[in-house]
Amino acid sequence: MKFRSIKGTHDILPGEVHRWQFAEEAVRSAMHSFNYLEIRTPAFEETALFSRSIGELTDIVGKEMYTFADRSGTSLTLKPEMTASVIRAYIQNNLGEQQPLVKVYYIAPMFRQERPQAGRLRQFHQFGAEAIGSAGPAVDAEIIALSARVYESLGLRNFAVRINSVGCRECRPAYRKLLTGYLRERRDQLSEESLRRLEQNPLRILDSKDEGDRRATKDAPLMIEHLGPECSGHFEGLKSMLSAAGVTYEIDGRIVRGLDYYTKTAFEITSSDLGSQDALAGGGRYDLLVKDLGGKDTPAVGFAAGMERLLMAMEKQPHDANEPPHPTVFIASADEKARELVASLVLKLRSKGLATESDLLGRSLKSQLREANRQNSDRLIVIGSEEIEKNRVTVRGLLSKDEFSIPLDRVADELPSRLKEK
Ligand code: HAM
């Protein structure tokens, strides 16, 4: 019987992992330059944490969570997103008592049982950030600028920042009533899915991809046209701060996020280099969540972005990338007698931090040399009875073609510094 990975999950193989590490380094560097510290939370949490924060009626909670009872009967769920986990950790560890504004970031795997397609997986990876403790639009602007910074720093150009405000508990109910009335009059044009949403979550109908829904909602009232004075002032503040920060953005009154916790700012970053799953990142403000989860009334804002989608977008245009790691030195044994000496020399060089490789498969000298080239080793040393007898080896560059010789018994001491000089 042959086992295969579960549908919608992927192995990240040794030949491609350097691309991930390169992107992760860019994420970390952007996060640190904005003074965000990393937080790591467990892979699973109590199910109720997610249903309460993301919302019982959302697709994520209703259809997509990996939920199971553990052996003691507790209902657990693999993280479908990080925000709920971060807020749980924030409350549990009293992070807000240590400082008034807590700024954290993460890079972690998430799990959602969605229909797999390009850019949509069941185990995917998100990077993201949460800033907990400030109500003002300056933090919203910082979060948006930070997310855009990651893409800019990787040389991506074909992305757009789209912002909206989804109002708050004060102004949203009246708007919702208005929208529901508008949509009820156009019931016959709505898709089945939207009819189901009409009474429970009518705002989601605005971002439906169905043609009929799109026609029906073409002139629908939008939340940004009906914001109360506080939300409207916040949105104006955000716009001017983004402009001051030099972040190019569009206003898109149809952004309705797929999670229920948002208040005021909601935003997405989309890429024209991706197919139908074009959202690189999404986020917004969630001022009620900390209190809803049992903490003090604390405003917060954040974003999360798909790593796989970032890597897909990077593939579509030229960008900097790092080389896969390779040995600095390959030491080949010219005969059987040299093998033991080579093995101990390899260990000595490795302990000095030099990436060193040798043959472990008993191969002929010729195929050892082929292997050194295949592995893109920078240098090659061949050791045999002649080198041992004369106490002298030649260090040959495989790409550079330069070479020098040193005493065999000085290799471990001298080679690392000799190579550093080069
Ligand atoms: P989200 O929009 O559900 O938001 O996910 C954010 C990003 O994760 C998406 O834009 C997409 O790039 C990626 N993503 C989501 N689902 C998948 C999937 N099945 N396969 C591949 N990539 C996917 C959140 O998760 C919120 N927690 C964001 C947030 C943070 N809001 C405030 N703070």
Image (tube, grey):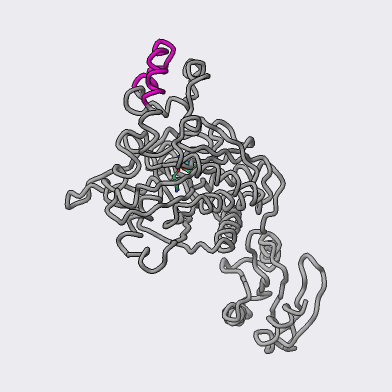
Write down the region rendered in magenta. 177-196
Instruction: Please identify the quarter of the rendering in which residue 182 is found.
Output: top left
Quadrant (top left, top right, bottom left, bottom right) of the N terminus: top left
Quadrant (top left, top right, bottom left, bottom right) of the C terminus: bottom right
Asked if residue 393 can be seen in this view, the reply is: yes
Instruction: Please identify the quarter of the rendering in which residue 332 is found.
Output: bottom right
**In this rendering, position of residue 250 left or right of residue 214:** right
**In this rendering, position of residue 67 left or right of residue 10:** left
Which secondary structure class fits the magenta region best? helix
**In this rendering, position of residue 347 left or right of residue 318:** left
- Outermost residue, left side: 72
Q: 418 or 331, which is in the foreground?
A: 418
**Where's residue 157, x and y in %?**
68, 43
Q: 408 or 323, which is in the foreground?
A: 323
Q: 250 or 149, which is in the foreground?
A: 250
62 lies above or below 212: below
